[in-house]
Image (cartoon, grey):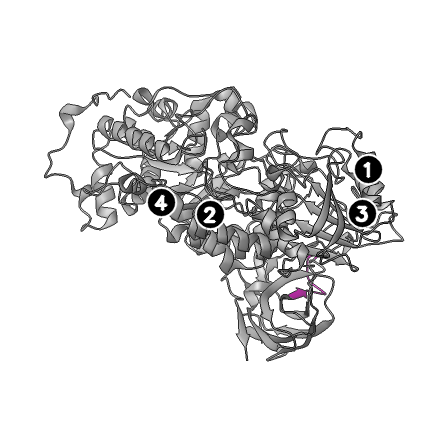
Amino acid sequence: MTTTTPDHADLSPADDDRPWSDPARPVEERVEALLARLTLEEKVAQLGSAWEDVEPAGPEVAPGTNLFGRVGDLDETARHGLGQLTRPYGTLPRPALEHARLLAERQRQIVAQSRFAIPAMAHDECLTGFTAYGATIYPTSLGMAATFDPALIRRVGAAIGADMAAAGVHQGLAPVVDVIRDYRWGRCEETYGEDPYLAGEMGEAYVLGLQSAGVYATLKHFAGYSASMGGRNHAPVGMGRRELTDVILPPFERAVAAGVGSVMNSYAEIDGEAPAASRRLLTGVLRDQWGFEGTVVSDYWSLPFLVNAHRVAADLSAAGALSLAAGLDVELPDQRGFGPALVEAVRRSEVTEADVDRAVRRVLRQKVALGLLDPDWSPEPPALRAGELDLDKPVNRQLAHAVAQSSAVLLSNSGGLPLPSAGRIALIGPCADDVRTMFGCYSFPNHVLADRDDLGNGVEALSLRTALAAELPDVDWVFEQGCPIREEDRSGVPAAVAASRAADLTVLVVGDKAGMFGIGTSGEGCDVEDLRLPGVQEELVEAVLATGRPVVLVVSSGRPYAVGRFAADAAAMVQVFLPGEEGGRAVAGLLSGAANFSGRLPVQIPNSPAGQPYTYLHPPLGDRQSWLSNLDPTPAFPFGHGLSYTTFEIDGLAADRDVVPTDGRFTVSVRVRNTGAVPGAETVQLYFTDPVAQVTRPVRALLAYAKVPLAPGEETTVGFDVHTDRLAFTGLDGHRIVEPGEILLYAGSSSRATPNELSVQLVGEQRDATVIRHHGVPVALT
């Protein structure tokens, strides 16, 4: 690698005149001292990035890699310094230590070319684990949400953060806290589901975990991305301000309140406004209302998209000026709008240098906080100095197993599970013996190695077929694929039907294989027209069920498919949301009965592939109105649903008061008892509705929940401390308010299984609740 001499070497400061390198000085003093020395070109350089490993050929790992490619060599792109290095681990398959050595070399070059020896921050993807070759692959975010266990997800974030920090990566591009609005959207798997409170809980847990390891988390995608029309990626968003404020924004707001370090803009447009150029969103909401103090980074090539996709900027210079003025601080993955184009925009007075300074301050604060400007900073990542970088440690695998096990949802069971320990069982389906059908689209194998089967997966992963054979060795297993994931090849169906007829029981495993931009059936750019299973898998299911033999249907998918119509004929049904590298072992242990199911649905499972236009969080008109329409949107399995090998009873719902001030709080308690014969965990769920309000309100909304492990016969009381902020909504005047009136509370095991009901009355003046205080953490009572 070539190292060049800085253009301004004659202006370099003396060694004793570097106050920004003194850790004893206040952060702001250090930042201002360095900012005052930087030229305009050096300032703008801190707002840009370089993607050294990007390849214009092969699978697209971001929307535009085959179109945009590289800007130039590091000699040129870091000529005045550099803000960020893009995906030093997550682009090409190299051994981890080789990546670390290359990262160190690049940092040395950047420092050498920088007049003030400023290193770059390095960022990488980390949605289902550190997206690096050989790194642990956890379940998808949708699977994590199905655990209903934020403490567990905080451990996942901490584990991923520890690996990234050891590798010398400073920022992770996760979590995705978009709230699902249309199941057809390919990126459903990347989210925490369809409820803003659950998404906020899980997102906050992941952020706190990742940042506990010294790695900045990045909220994605601000805002509205998940509500694209028709579920089509990068399509316009036509939502109103109430849906935006009451459904889409709360998870972002919660993570900002928790201290998240970075926020990434959405690719979508909202009512004609592109978020990458929206001062209303990036400054008005994010900073002025919520007090966010971190950096706003662009999603990859968002600035060029302002020119060629949104057409709100005439050229890259105008795009850079628009985004900077709106409040965007760092351009990823390179420097097309925030490189020389931004320098020229400042010189033409299209944007002020004060706007540049504002963004650079935010970048430098983070570099100071990370220790990048300290005199003892080393370009070598900690793992490189130690000589070892194991990204799939046994403790990580144990954690991945715990999440996979906790995320599997038992939808129905009429005696098909647990599986018998002997006899003849047919294992059928395209997802039964392909480990990549258990990985999300941002896992390294599916993300980068889609055309490189020769490199394997980089991690050990057992297919469900292999795991079941080990779990139940006395069973006579017979395997038939039946059909491919997506190709319309029915030639294997007759053999699958014959195997099922000859067996005592069949385990049928169907679903997705995630990928990017049409390579997969789930994932970024892998949207669907309706909610039928991909390819001819539905025909396979119908044919196997028609044998009349007992069938356990296992769906491993990145979105909820309309499999509810199979429930009446299946002996049992299980839903997993791409459970990661330990998914085979975890699911096998659950099917055998060695472990108990405890997952709950973070999304509904529809009955009809096209007759379910709403998520559970809908107003009254979204419910079935049989006299107005022939379509029935009632789901097969509702939000929050999940069974177990034991049974539970939930009763005794009570509140400590039935009259509450509009700026008050109350405690709700409910009893839960394990009424079965084996240990298990029930997720007690508290919902509310506002029966009469000035605007339409959801028929059910999750207010709080608690996952409670119980031994057979054990009983406990769970308490939920609720502040009235949790009941706020956007009123007719556009302000978030808490309105006096009746609130109905429901407790149970899902959004539709809520046999316990009570009423509280909010009294007093209508209260402005523009800034929400995030309350409602469940507290176990004796």
Tell which circle, 3 or 4, labels the residue nearer the N-terminal end: 4
What's the distance in space between the residues labelled 3 and 4, CA to CA?
A: 51 Å
Label pair 1/3, CB-CB below 8 angstroms? no
Location of residue 735 in the rendering, given as x and y in whole percent from the top left corner: 57, 55
Label pair 1/2, CB-CB below 8 angstroms? no
Which of label 1 and label 2 is nearer to you?
1
Label pair 4/2, CB-CB below 8 angstroms? no
Q: Amino acid at mark 4?
A: Ala
Q: Answer with left or right where residue 588 lies relative to residue 22.
A: right
Location of residue 584 in the rendering, given as x and y in whole percent from the top left corner: 60, 47
Give me the residue at 65% from left, 51% from top.
Answer: 473
Which of label 3 and label 2 is nearer to you?
3
Q: Is residue 70 above or below residue 617?
A: above
Q: Is residue 694 magenta?
A: yes
Which of label 3 and label 4 is nearer to you?
3
Q: Which residue is mark 3?
A: 503
Which of label 1 and label 3 is nearer to you?
3
Q: Residues within 10 Å of mark 4 (few under 14, many from 20)?
A: many
Tell which circle, 3 or 2, labels the residue nearer the N-terminal end: 2
Q: Start and end of the magenta stretch?
A: 686-696
SS class, disc 2:
helix
Toward which corner of the image does residue 360 lie, by quadrant?
Answer: top left
Q: Which residue is mark 2?
A: 286
Tell which circle, 1 or 2, labels the residue nearer the N-terminal end: 2
Q: Which residue is mark 4?
A: 165
What's the distance in space between the residues labelled 4 and 1, CA to CA?
A: 47 Å
Toward which corner of the image does residue 226 lie, by quadrant?
Answer: top right
Give me the residue at 72% from left, 32% from top.
Answer: 484
Q: Is residue 570 above or below residue 762?
A: above
